[in-house]
Image: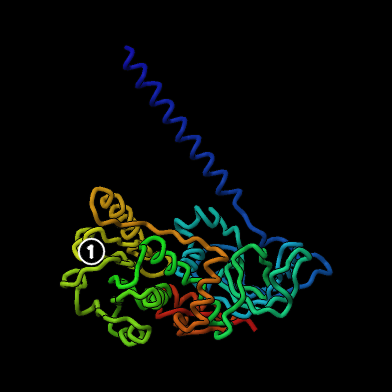
Amino acid sequence: MKIKRIIKWTARALLFALILAFLCGFIAYWTSTNDCGRTIPAGAERMKAIKYCEYGSPDDVLKLEQVEKPVPNDDQVLVRVRAVSLRFYDGGMLEGGIGRLIFGLRKPKNTIPGSDFAGTVEAVGRNVTEFKPGDEVFGVRAGALAEYICVRQAGAIALKPANTNFEQAASIPTALVSLQGLRDTGRLQKGQKVLINGASGGVGTFAVQIAKAFGAEVTGVCSTKNLDLVRSLGADHVIDYTKEDFTKGEARYDVIYDLVNNRSFAERRRILKPGGICVLAGIGGSGMHKDTLSNLAGELTASLRSKFGNEKFVLFGVDINKKDLGVLRDLTESGKVLPALTKTYPLTETAAAYNYLETGHVQGKIAITIE
C-alpha cells in the first residue's frame, strides 16, 4: 500500500509539474512581444535601420525603416555606423526555431539585427574619456544594422586598425572566436601542428592567420574552390575534403580546431597526438540547417567521451571583450591578420546578404555598408 501511495503521489506531482510548465510556456509565448508597435515621439530625430518584427525568411521579414535615433547616456559613445559584418548565427536569429528560446518566443525581442560594426564616433557622454568625436572604431553591439548605435565605453569597442577600411574592420570581431579558441582553449604553442576544419569560412580564415601568428604549422581543410584562398592566408598544407579524408592521413596534430564537426569522435581522436586537444568551435554552416542538431549532439557526445581519455574534446564559447579586440587590432596593424572580406552589400540589399549567408558556404566574410 505504501508503494502504491508513493507512485500515486509521484504521478500527481509530475502531472502538476507538466501542467504548470505548459501554462508558464503558454503565457510566456503569448506575452512575448517587441517594440514594433511603438510610435516615434514627436520631435525625435530619426535614422534608417533594418528591422524585423516577426520570424521568417530574410525576404519576408527584413524591412528598411525610419526609427528613433538613440541618444548616448553619460557612459556611452554614439557611433555613426559605416559597416556591419554578419556572423553565422545571424541567419538563425531571423528563422526562429530553437533560437526562440534566446531571441524571443513568439516575436524577436531585439528588432534590429546585426552586431559586428565599424564606424565613426559622433558624440560621447560626459564620463567618456577613452574616445572622442571623429575617432574611427569597431566592436560588437546588438542592433548594429542602423545608422547609429550607442555603445558603453567599457563595452566591446576599440579604435579601428589604421590599415583597414570600415568593411574590413567590421569583420574583425568574428576573429574573437579564432583567437580565444586557439589561444585559451586549444593552448596552441609555437611549433605545434594544428588542423583547421572549415578553414575558408568567416572564422576559419581568421583561425589560419592567427595560428600562423602563434608560430604553428597549419593545415587547412576546405573545398576545391577555396584552396587558393586558404593558401593565400598562410596555411602550410591544404586538404581538399572533396578528394581526401583528413582523418585517414598519416599526420598527427597537437590541436584540431573544428568548425564543422562532421567527423566521428574516433576519427578525430585518431589524428590527435597523445594529450592533444580538439576545440569544438562550430557546427558547420550558418543558421539552422539539416545537420545542426546532429552536429550539436556530436559535440556534446565527444566532449563527454573525452573526459575518460588522454585526448580532450572541449566545447568552446566566445567571450566578447574590449581587451581581445585590442589584441586583434594589434595583430591586424602588424599585418599578421587581415580580414578575408569577399563580398559586400548596400543596406538596401540586406536581405540578399542574409540569403547568401544562409547557403552555408560563404567564403571568408561578408559585410553590409551603411551610407
Which residue is pictured at 25% across the width and 80% down the height?
240
Which quarter of the rendering shows the N terminus? top left
Please indicate whether residue 124 sits to the left or right of residue 5 in the image.
right
Q: Nearer the viewer, residue 178 or 289?
A: 178
Q: Is residue 57 visible?
A: yes
Residue 229: x and y in percent read 36, 85
5 above or below 313?
Answer: above
320 above or below 28?
Answer: below
Q: Nearer the viewer, residue 8 or 322?
A: 322
Which residue is pictured at 72% across the width and 61% down the height?
38
Q: Quadrant of residue 27?
A: top right
Q: Nearer the viewer, residue 303 or 365?
A: 303
Residue 357: x and y in percent read 45, 75
How crowded pointer 1 is (Cα within 10 Å; few <14, some 14-19, many 20+) is rated as many
Q: Quadrant of residue 277?
A: bottom left
67 above or below 5?
Answer: below
Which residue is pictured at 49% across the width and 77% down the height?
331
Residue 160: x and y in percent read 59, 78
Which residue is farthest right?
Answer: 43
Which quarter of the rendering shows the C terminus? bottom right
Q: Is residue 359 visible?
A: no
Colouring of the image: rainbow
